[in-house]
Image (cartoon, coloured by chain):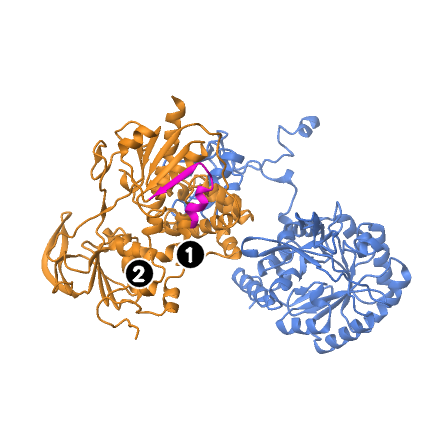
Amino acid sequence: MADLTSEFVGIKSPNPFWLASAPPTDKEYNVRRAFEAGWGGVVWKTLGEAGPPIVNVSGPRYGAIWGADRRLLGLNNIELITDRPLETNLQEIKSVKRDYPDRAVVVSLMVPCEEGPWKKILPLVEDTGADGVELNFGCPHGMAERGMGSAVGQVPEYIEMVTRWCKQYSRMPVIVKLTPNIADIRKPAEAAQRGGADAVSLINTINSITSVNLDDFIPEPTIDGRGAHGGYCGPAVKPIALSMVSEIARNPETTNLPISGIGGVTTWRDGAEFLALGAGNVQVCTAAMTYGFKIVQEMISGLSEWMDEKGHASVADVVGRAVPNCGDWQDLNLNYITKAEINQDSCINCGRCFAACEDTSHQAILMSEDRTFSVDEGECVACNLCINVCPVEGCITMRELQVGEVDERTGREVDGTHGDWTTHPNNPAVAAAE
Amino acid sequence: MTASIATDGIVSNRLSGEELAENFSDLHPPLDPHEALVAADRCYFCHDAPCTTACPTEIDIPLFIRQIATGTPESAARTIFSQNILGGMCARVCPTETLCEEVCVRETAEGKPVKIGRLQRYATDTLMAKPGHPFTRAADTGKTIAVLGAGPAGLSCAHRLAMKGHAVTIYDLRSKGGGLNEFGIAAYKSVDGYAQDEVEWLLAIGGITVECGKSVPLSELADAFDAVFLGVGLSGVNALGVEGEDKNNVLDAVSFISDLRQADDLASLPIGRRVVVIGGGMTAVDAAVQSKLLGAQDVTMVYRRGREAMSASEFEQVLATSKGVRIIYNAQPLRVTGNGAAAAIEFGYTETVDGKLRPTGETFTLAADQVFKAIGQTLEGAPDALNLEGRKIAVDENGRTSVKNVWAGGDCASGGDDLTVTAAAEGRDAAEDIHTTLMGG
């Protein structure tokens, strides 16, 4: 059996699946149920300063987009940090951590961008026995207008400054949660590292408007006739999150900076992909909000089955395995040639590959009188669109041309050498260097 | 005292009003909006879609399903009606399992086609529930056309002609329009007076006059109108040609179905305790199933050939057996016995050797107090001037008959299956050709 135990910046948990700071971790009742369901850890929903708590809207907080049969693909929220008193949250954190010493309990924090408030709140959190803190520099709505959340996360100097305060006033590991609403994700990660962060976590939610009510012309969710942008998450954001995680993992400056991967993790497979791209663990929210806490059981069994099947003994063995294979476009081998192949036995003759290729790509799929679809290798550039639009998984595949075979499109023989843009004769930069 | 299913003879009131209402409720209840979205999501939006090719009216099925999926069922309905103005009825009565749904790629992939028929009903019901009519007439052309028969072919032809700006007069012998939609098909396929609602909705295009209970000789019509379209259907019923066929209670299935469709109170319809239906088509199934639903105790359908040769689809056969109808294959009637009225019917088993049907010599007898004949209908009273092809009016691909300015379509004309959807296509296409002919010259 694969060992799923996780140690992330010194914080141990029985598995690498944590619940992200969000509504599911807002109070003791939920967190206890989550731990009973099997979650390895939680990041407690963001605490703010002592005093009167923030106030949320009392209309819709979420907006969504759906796929077939209303499968939720993307979720947008305009909820703020916890709206419960600081003292209540601290008591509950202490109580939960006492009863679940083997689970990770990290506390998310967001206070004004001044030294005083951070210095004040950190000892209170430390006193609960929590395993660490996560600095919420990511929330893009509401709190950002008050100079917190992503307003801090978008300024690397602020990130560095606040992180330094936290390391100065606390013994706890400090995880800095990054906003994706920025041009280059490497900059805030580097800033966090300079400030002494133990890790970064990403991505927080993406600025979004999910829909517009076309009767009233108001963005949704609508509050009394007006809408505001929210934070987008769920399965739809996974590709963006994976890319950002990989950029930090392969950046020489931050290559040793631990990452907690967040963004659309819905199944064990999503989690494994984040691990492979360099995340030490993953955090989940939307999937739990869509299906309930029980989904972690599939994540645990799935990850375990895959690791056993592949012979990966521990989570650490998997982390970062795909990072060396992540590169820049200019390094891709232009001499690598594949061609689409349609398996006529599994083809159901829907013709989607034909429509896509004929109308929008390379006219490389032929349709016979009796609607049999085949590939014209003389035109096929192996773009993969036919595979992407085919409703039958595995019906169309890409066949790699072997050394000695001729690419009918170019008339050139595959010679097995590597040749990329950096050395290609058509690259003006190469010509200039000569 | 009311009768029960076990009461001998042909009696009414075998079942309570409640049971009858349940039995004759919608065979395929309409999809609700969520069900429609789920069903629509399954469509792959095929290129050169096989479903469209399989549809006699060539409705752009992927397009209308996508229009449903994107929340615009009225646009979906316009897509349907622009090809087939009787798309609402066809959604109810089409044997989709042998047309669009049979060739759906999801039938190929999973054995579960997209529910095309029910989605079509969802779209057409949605639009028809709104006031108004989706099409408008072109400017008056001054041309007049007579349409004989207010069934699917005639209505489809008349609507298309009216749209083009022609003035149309429909004549029909029956008391009201609709043809087999109104008088012929099983009640549970067209509930709540849908056939009449559809006629009324269709006529809202304007420019169409309907004269019911009236027949005018072709020669008179040809003189009075610029063109004539014949959509008179098949009014004759084939005879069994066996001894005892003239006994009481040996009846035409089409008359039984027609009476049933026109009955105000189903409980008042008399039905036998033991009913035998002879035939293997849709009419036979409709008669057998409805006999059972009226409360007949034993209903047996007897067909002279095997299951695979039966023109009623597998779906219809399963429907019949699920309602308790017994189907006997490979047997043909030999004689009807009884004293004045039918009491039993004797059958001989058949086999097919070298494509020819022949008796095996084995026989059996079924008790029967009511026998319905459903072995096909024939053209009756076709004007002598018209050439026939086989037993139908000969027409070319545009519906032109051998007589100038006379077109024909639907069951009475040669070519195509005897289906509502085929009639709708032929009526439409004839109208287009009539328009081209009248306006071109």
Q: Tag 2, which secondary structure?
A: helix
Q: Is residue B386 left or right of residue B16?
A: left
Q: Which chain is blue?
A: A
Disc 2 is attached to a residue of which chain?
B
Q: Amino acid at mark 2?
A: Gln
Colour used to depict chain B in the structure image: orange
Residue B385 spot, x, y in % from top left: 22, 31
Please tell me in which quadrant of the rendered image residue A78 appears. bottom right
Query: Vertical placement of B137 versus B66: above or below?
Result: above
Q: Amino acid at mark 1?
A: Asp
Q: Which residues are magenta?
A: B197-212
Q: Is residue B47 left or right of residue A57?
A: left
Check if mark 2 and mark 1 are on a common chain.
yes
Mark 1 neighbour class, 10 Å CA radius: few under 14, some 14 to 19, many 20 or more: few
Please tell me in which quadrant of the rendered image residue A146 appears. bottom right
Q: How far, Cα to Cα, is label 2 from label 1? A: 16 Å
Q: Is residue A322 left or right of residue B5?
A: right
Tag of residue B192? 1
Q: Tag 1, which secondary structure?
A: loop
For mark 2, what is the residue? Answer: B290
Residue A386 spot, x, y in % from top left: 50, 42
